[in-house]
Every structure is written in structure tokens, then in C-alpha cells.
Amino acid sequence: MQFSEIRVHDGQHCFVTKPERAVRVVLTLHKASDNISMTTCRERKGYKEYVHPYFSQLYTSTDVKDIWSNIHHIQQSERHLKRIKKRLNLQRADQYSPIETVVHQIVRLYGEGYVNIGYRFMWKLLNVMCGVRVTQQTVRIVIAALDPEGVNVRSRNRLRRRHYSSWGPYFTIHIDGYDKLKPFGIAIHGAIDGFSRKVLWLKAGYTNDNPKYIAGLLSKDITDCLE
């Protein structure tokens, strides 16, 4: 089933937005600070504190307009918002970071464990988390040069095994669930010890995503091990 528009609630307000923007706007509604209240833009000395954070997180003008309206209670048109960004010199075009900075940040993210991600997710991390302005095309070319094997593996939809160190039994536990039988009321959950490769549990129940249920399986397994 496809929807042309989605109605989003933030507890007090309701507005209609497109499906592809609904998730980002809802996340922003939950993360927004409750102590910010505004009625009009004229009561503020500037717009930077309301424009720059969303601009750095790659929100579009339409997204920012909806967020302003429902979080900060600022009623402004999208056209006026674009004028504000122009006045603050917030333009994404022709303001890209040097290629040396891009390569350095990608190598750093690889060292932090972001090895198996694609170029789109890497582009998002660079722009939002690292503050590096770069195009997706540049990220794709750099990743292809730095990690051609990983690009080849991802293009064939194959997973690459991760290398990690385990200090002993129960230091690293790999868990996973099987949801294909959920329509029939059967949810399967299993766990394997990363050190000994021993199957710790493989259970079928009414759920496999309830934290209390998963914690109960782990607690029972540890208790049986100690006995």
C-alpha cells in the first residue's frame, strides 16, 4: 500500500507531509528541546540558531518550514526561508571540503568500524557527523579507490566477515531473530557465543524483539552455565 501523504502528530499539533520526509520530521519532533518556544520571528535577534542546525543536518527548506511551524511556532513561507539562508550565506553549492579532508575522514571512519557501509551512508556521516561538505559522487569514487574489495562485495549483495577480538566465553554474543513465521504466531530467536561458536539458545516463542524476553533468555542461559 502506498501513501501520497502522511499525517504527523507531535502530541499537540498535526500536519501533513510526504512519506519520504515523514521519518526525518518525526525524529526531529522527538529530539527537539521542550524549552524553546517562539511565536514570531520578529521576537528574535537572528535566525542562525534556527537555521544552521537543520541546514548542517541536510534538511530541505520544506522540512525546516514544517519543523519551524510545529516545534518553534514560527510561521514562515518556504520562499522567505530560502531568503534567510541566502542572507546567512548557507549555500551547499561550491562549498565543498578539500579532497584530502574527505579521504582522511573516510579512513578515520573505517578505523572506527564503519567498514561495511555504502557510499550513501558514508556521505551522510561525513556531512552530518564530521561536518565535511562533499558530494555523493566524490564519496563513491574515494571509497572505490580505498576499498575496492568491499565495493565488489556489496555490489554482489554478499556480507564480509568482521574481524574482532574476543577475550573469552560470553565476552561477545551474536543474536538474531527469524520473523518469517510471525504471521503464524511463531517468533524464533537464537544466540551464538563469539568465542567458542557454541549455540547458546534457539527458542521459538510469541516474540523475538521484546527486551524483557531476550534478557530472560540470557539470564536463564547464564544461570544454567553457572550450575
Image: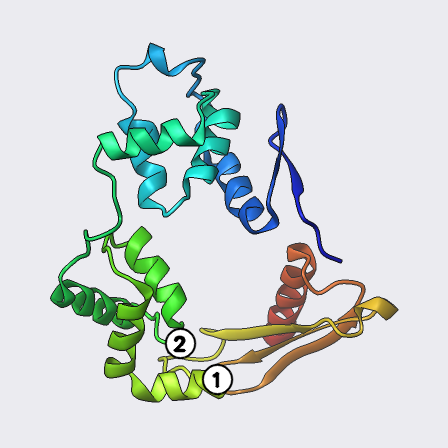
Q: Quadrant of residue 82?
A: top left
Image quadrant in which the C terminus is located: bottom right
Residue position marked by numbered label 2 in the rendering:
116
Q: Residue at x 36, y 58 (%)?
A: 124
The residue lying furthest to the right in this view is 184
In this orientation, does residue 160 appear? no
Locate residue 215 relative to residue 120 in the image: left or right: right
Locate residue 17 relative to residue 143 in the image: left or right: right
Q: Quadrant of residue 72?
A: top left
Locate residue 73 relative to residue 92 in the image: left or right: right
Q: Residue at x 29, y 34 (%)?
A: 85
Q: Residue at x 24, y 75 (%)?
A: 142
- The answer to whether residue 30 is above or below residue 20 is above
Residue 137 disc label? none
Badge 2 marks a residue whose secondary structure is loop
Q: Residue at x 29, y 81 (%)?
A: 144
- The answer to whether residue 95 is above or below residue 158 is above
Crowding around mark 1 (Cα neighbors within 10 Å: few <14, some 14 to 19, many 20+) is: few
Where does the image place residue 135, in percent across and percent down from the top left?
Answer: 29, 62
Residue position marked by numbered label 1 in the rendering:
159
Of labels 1 and 2, earlier in sequence is 2
Asked whether the residues under the numbered discs 1 and 2 touch, taking CB atoms below 8 Å apart as contact, a structural biologist would say: yes
Image quadrant in which the N terminus is located: bottom right
Where does the image place residue 184, in percent across and percent down from the top left?
Answer: 87, 70
Task: Tell me how far mark 1 sits from mark 2, CA to CA.
Answer: 8 Å
Q: Quadrant of residue 136?
A: bottom left
Where does the image place residue 101, in percent across and percent down from the top left?
Answer: 15, 63
Q: What amino acid is found at the position of numbered circle 1 in the picture? A: Leu
Q: Nearer the viewer, residue 102 or 33?
A: 102
